[in-house]
Image: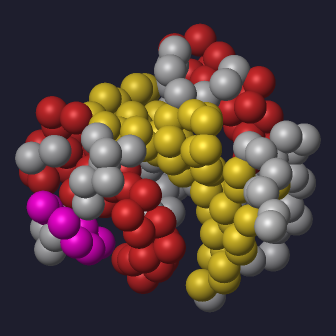
Amino acid sequence: MRVIAGSAGGLKLLSPNGNDTRPTADRVREALFSIIGDDIAGASFLDLFAGTGAVGIEALSRGAGRAVFVDASPQCVEIINKNLAHTRLTDNARVTNADVCFALKKILNDSFDIIYVDPPYGGGVTEAALNDIILYKRLADNGFIITEYGAGEVICKPDGLTIVKEKAYGRTRLIFYLARVPETG
């Protein structure tokens, strides 16, 4: 696993031992950031269920203004901090060791332009995280949320979100949400 592009492009990232963490594949991250395009420049980025931090680190490498990483695993938080140091992207990053829903309710106190939600597949926590993002106003005006799902998972779209794009990459699906209905015309 490596950083695809930007200031840290080509640098390898660490990953925890074992099968508890499923890092987002390089080709999925490459496609994701191709879709995001110029929206990443200067953006505030929230990486929930961050694992290795690869997605948030990619965002920083490509010009995000800041990134916050949240993961409940102390081992993952240690890996994220090591990856940030290795890529020299620590200045605009903050790492939080907490349950995602607890962090959304009690720890985070600002909103983000782009929020990436990548919980363990089949864990059933995505809908709770999306609801808390809306309830606690963690999404900035005109911001968007991207969720990563397993190909066979049922999608429950919370009230207040509109699906604007869905892409499949093998066993992985990315779904892009807006917190408002897109304007027509």
Magenta stretch: give its range. Answer: 1-8
**Residue 101 visible in image:** no
Q: Is 92 situated left or right of 88 in this image?
A: right
| Residue 7 included in the magenta stretch of the image | yes
- Rendered residue at 52%/15% (across/down): 109
Residue 16: % across, % down: 34, 54
Look at 28% across and 41% down and name the residue there.
65
Position of 104 compared to 123: left or right?
left
The image shows residue 18 at horizontal and vertical percentages of 43, 60
| 26 shown above or below 138 | below
Give the residue drawn at x 69%, y 21%: 136
**Relative depth, front residue between 42 and 91:** 42
Rendered-image quadrant of the C terminus: bottom right
Q: Can residue 185 be found in the magenta stretch?
A: no
Q: How many labels does the image show?
A: 0
Q: Which of 72 and 148 is in front in this view?
A: 148
Side of 160 where 40 appears, left or right: left
Q: Quadrant of residue 153?
A: bottom right
Residue at image coords 27%, 35%: 93
Please identify the quadrant where the N terminus is shown: bottom left
